[in-house]
Each structure stands twice: as C-alpha cells, then as structure tokens.
Amino acid sequence: MSVLNRTWRVAGMPSEHLETSHFSFETADRPEAGDGQVLCRVLWISMDAAQRAWFQAATYRAAIQVGDAMPGFSLAQVVESRCDDFAVGDIVAGDLAWQDYVVAEPSGLRRIVPNRPLSNYLSVLGITGLTAYFGLLDIGEAKPGETVVVSGAAGATGTLVGQIAKLQGCRVVGICGSPEKQEWLTSELGFDAAVSYRDESFRKSLREACPDGIDVFFDNVGGTTLDTVLGSMAYRGRVVCCGVVSQYDTTTPVRGARGVPGVLIIKSITMRGFLVMTDFADRWDEGLKVLEGWLDDGSLKVREDTLEGLEKAPEGLIGLLNGNNVGKRMIHVADPS
C-alpha cells in the first residue's frame, strides 16, 4: 500500500484578509527523493506573520503563486536520502512546506541534534530566537540602563526580546493588544510595564511608561504604532525594524511613519532593518550557544502556542495574524520515528 502525502496548497490570492478559502487540502502519493536529494517527513511547522507577506510580492523569497504548496519553516526527519550529507533518521530544519512529506535539497537543510523538546528548535533555538538576539544586541545595541520598547510583545519574537533586554539590565516596556497579555508580560516575563495599542490613551500611557524616552524600539508591527513610538524616542535612539505585521494582512497598507526624516534628524535616530537568515548567517552558532545557556540556567522562559495536526495550519496562521497567539505559534504534525 502506498504512503499518502497531505498538502495544503494556495487556492487563491487574498483581496483583503487571509481566509481558509485561500487554501485547498489535497492528498497524493508520497514523493520520492531524486539523485542528490532527501525526502523529509515534516514534524513541526512554524507559523510566521511574514508568511502573509509572501502572498504580496517577492521578498527574501519568491512570491507565492496559486497552486503552490504553502511554504513554511519546519522541523523534519529524513526518511530517504540520496546524498552524502544526511542519513535516514536525521532531524533537520529548513524552509519546507505545509505537507507530510517534502523532497528537499541538502543545501537548504540544517542538521539538529536535539537535547531538549524538538519544538524549542523552531522557537527560542530557531530563527525566532536568533532574530531576537541579534536584532536587539547587534542592530539595537541595547545597553544596561536603557529603555527598550518592543511591539508585538506577546508574540514569538517579542517575548524573547523583552527577556533578553532584561538580562542586559534594560528597562523593558511591551506593546500588546489586551489586558490579559499586559498582565502576563509583567507578572510572568518580568517586563517593567506593558501598554495596549488598542487603548485610546496609548500615546499617553507609552510616555508615562517611558519618562526618559525610548532608547531602543524593537518593532514587529509598523504602521501607526511606529508613528506613535517615534514621538517618544530619546536622543540617538535606535529603531530595529523587524516586521510590519499590522500591514501584512491587507492589500491597502496604512501609510505609517509620516514625517520620519524630520524626527530622525532632530533626535539623531537611526532605523535599520535586517534579516537574520542572511545578515547573521555566519554567526548562528554563536547566538545559539548563548541562547542555550540562558535556557539551561532558567534565564529565558519559553512560551509555545501549539496546534495539533496538519489540518490546523490555515487556522493557525490566520489566528496569528489576528493576534490570537501568546508566544511562538506552531503546528505539531508528527513525532519522529
């Protein structure tokens, strides 16, 4: 009996918000690896807001087209190998797809030797953790005693940015979207304060939480939140541009950061974007070593928001875009053999 392979494909392009109707679920025979390739069984799939941006245009990867298997960063196990780089049974991480089985090129995979829950290698010990680490410390240059503000603070990257900033001796303020998340950030993760962008008094609350101004703003949201924060930046403040989740799930993005040139000049502010996959590709081992150390000594708390089953993938991404997650959202597809 043949082994079946379930796949979520892109069925249509969103005209506004992403919906489940933009995906189709199909079943076919499991593929086979060609010469020099490996066949991977997907175990965990990362849900990332940037996946919505892939529908809009080419970014650091080609734009998604109708009929494509929906791509996603994943953890997988090699079940067939026709190359010398990986053996059957190896656990790997890579840019794979919303499928049970994916044929992959070895050059796009990274071997994982797990010594803790596998899911950690998609969250704190994956792209998410490395983004928080290098973004805050190398791009943001956060220093002891400075005030760090992070938007999307209850999300995958934001939760880690805040904790790492505290480890550096910074005052940390989180921006999120509900009183429950505000309470969790301050009581569980040790943020000094948390404010809601949904409140009418958001601008005032932010100023009160940052009386000496904001030295580092780690921005995962963009849009009007960025507008608001810029008004409270300190002299020579640094803005780390990591994401614009507020603008992903729409075809008519709100123009944000109006008047930026004047603000940058008057306050000598720097704004810099980055991609950890390319800008810090040669330093991943360095970052992972530090992150593992913090995990081992209990300095970092990991919150993973898991949905069970491949069939939950569209629901998982849409919920993430709506802010329904706390911590790193991912899909558990299967356990390793």
Image (cartoon, grey):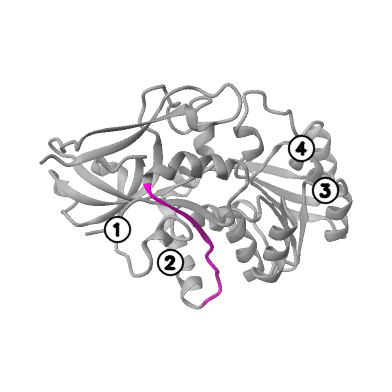
Q: CA distance from mark 3 to mark 4?
A: 13 Å
Choose top left, top right, bottom left or bottom right for residue 211: bottom right
Q: CA distance from mark 1 to mark 2?
A: 25 Å
What is the secondary structure assignment of the residue under circle 3? Answer: loop
Residue occupied by mark 2: 289
The x and y percentages for residue 71 are: 39, 36
Q: Tell me: 102 left or right of 159.
A: left
Relative height, residue 71 to residue 167 (above, below): above
* CB within 8 Å, label 4 to label 2: no
Q: CA distance from mark 3 to mark 2?
A: 39 Å
Q: Please state which of residues 80 and 317 is positioned toward the viewer in this rendering.
A: 317
Q: Which mark is residue 246?
A: none
**Magenta span covers which residues?**
298-309
Residue occupied by mark 3: 199
Relative height, residue 119 to residue 268 (above, below): below
Choose top left, top right, bottom left or bottom right for residue 187: bottom right
Residue at 61% of width from left, 51% of height from top?
139
What is the secondary structure assignment of the residue under circle 2? Answer: helix
